Image (tube, rainbow, N blue to C red):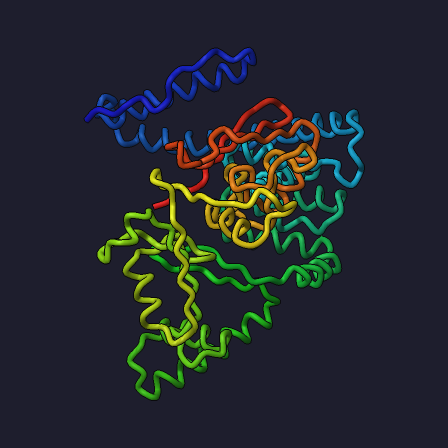
Amino acid sequence: MSVLRVVEPGPVSPDPVVARLDHLLVEMADWVRHCLEGLDEVADGHRVDRIARLEQLRAATAAVQAAECVRFAQSQVEAQLAAGVHPRRMGRGIGDQIGLACHVSPHTGSRRLATARALWFDLPHTYALLTAGKISERVAEIVVAETRHLNRQTRRVVDADIAQAEIGSLGVRQAEALARRIAYQADRHAYLTRGKTERANRCVTVRPAPDTMSYLTGFLPVEQGVACYAALNQATDTAVAAGDPRSRGQIMADTFVVRLTGQSTADDVDVEVHLTMPLAGLLDPDNHTPATLAGHGPVPADLARHLIHTTQGRVWWRRLFTAPTGHIVGGDPTRRRYTGWLARLITLRDQTCRDPYCDAPIRHLDHIRPYRDNGPTTLTNGRGVCARGNHVRDMPGWHIDTIHPGTRQESQPHTTITRTPTGHTYQSRAPDPP
């Protein structure tokens, strides 16, 4: 069995650490190739040793990355101070740059930075265990989370107690229980205060799931969550006793929808389906171009038609025609703000925040070339972003440019490039239309 080399040697970095890591990446890619091609026959005992060492290496790598995140953040704050950034904006964009480097969302990048800071400044024993590969990155994150309500002095004491309790010998759930118990015993009042404070963060979120499903999640106080589940469970018991042929899971899910929406049945939802399709496909009754369901993403054409034909709720069916190359066209350059169908076109084109690796919902419609710099209010100069992405781009050293406008003359979708204060660049393409 042969495979392509997945990591090719690139230009040698002037940083010796980066150059060494690049060499290691190529070496590990060759190692994978040897395994896939059966060129490395060893005893199973040796393979188990390799697996164990690689797990340790994974933890140690996380520890090194955490150190680099902290030092990077310190340097960036110094640069922002020198640039005269307002104190309220100090630190903005640091987690975003970490997220871009790690190919994760800005929110995740900021969370990683917060974890790194906690390990570096407040949890030296946990950090040492992570560096030595004696605990996983997941366990280290748990210790950070379970001690976040403690002041620095108490947190260091708890950190030492957790390490002394040999947390590295425990499974993830046992480690979480241990950290929570020791943190609670160290400061019961702070633990209870934390619980009361967290209630202010209650919320409901929705995100796509595989196979045209979705996750609707409520982050609720424990007594409210238990009460909601108990009510659904009681309704399910009643329906089962009455001979309802649906499974318990189906009954509970349908009851959940009915009680939230006030509909008579779960299927009778108000549907708005946006179908982005090539003009030629409009005339073909057997066209199977996927639809884009607002707030979810692509769904099969058959399912979209089923939703429209079977629901007893209100139905909106909108067709957006595309240029011959397949990209949405249209816009109104005369307005100061993106409104009406121009705003809807950008939102449908981009679907989620256009910052690289950020999948947050679109909250702002941003001028790529700023309006204050005579940037036009057009489809090609607009992008949908989250609130964070719109604010970060105004920090010193951030630049965004359009490299492919996505017009009918081009075969490329709308593409932008983001340049960070360190000079790194990241591309963002609009999702491919049907």
Give coordinates of residue 211: x percent, y percent: 33, 56
Left or right? Give the position of 61 relative to 364. left
Above or below — where is 373 with respect to 234? Answer: above
Question: Is the N terminus in the top left, top right, bottom left or bottom right quadrant?
Answer: top left
Q: Residue at x 58, y 42 (%)?
A: 333
Quarter of the image holding residue 413? top left
Above or below — where is 212 with respect to 432? Answer: below
Q: Residue at x 35, y 55 (%)?
A: 299
Q: Residue at x 50, y 39 (%)?
A: 357
Above or below — where is 277 with respect to 240? Answer: above
Quarter of the image holding residue 81? top right
Can residue 179 be seen by looking at this rendering?
yes
- Name the residue at the bottom extreme: 242
Can residue 126 be seen by looking at this rendering?
no
Front residue of this view, candidates 305 and 39: 305
Front residue of this view, candidates 68 and 130: 68
Front residue of this view, candidates 195 and 80: 80
Give coordinates of residue 327: x percent, y percent: 40, 41
Left or right? Give the position of 280 relative to 134. left
Left or right? Give the position of 87 relative to 132. right
Q: Residue at x 58, y 38 (%)?
A: 109
Front residue of this view, candidates 423 and 59: 423
Q: How many marks?
A: 0
Give coordinates of residue 196: x percent, y percent: 70, 63
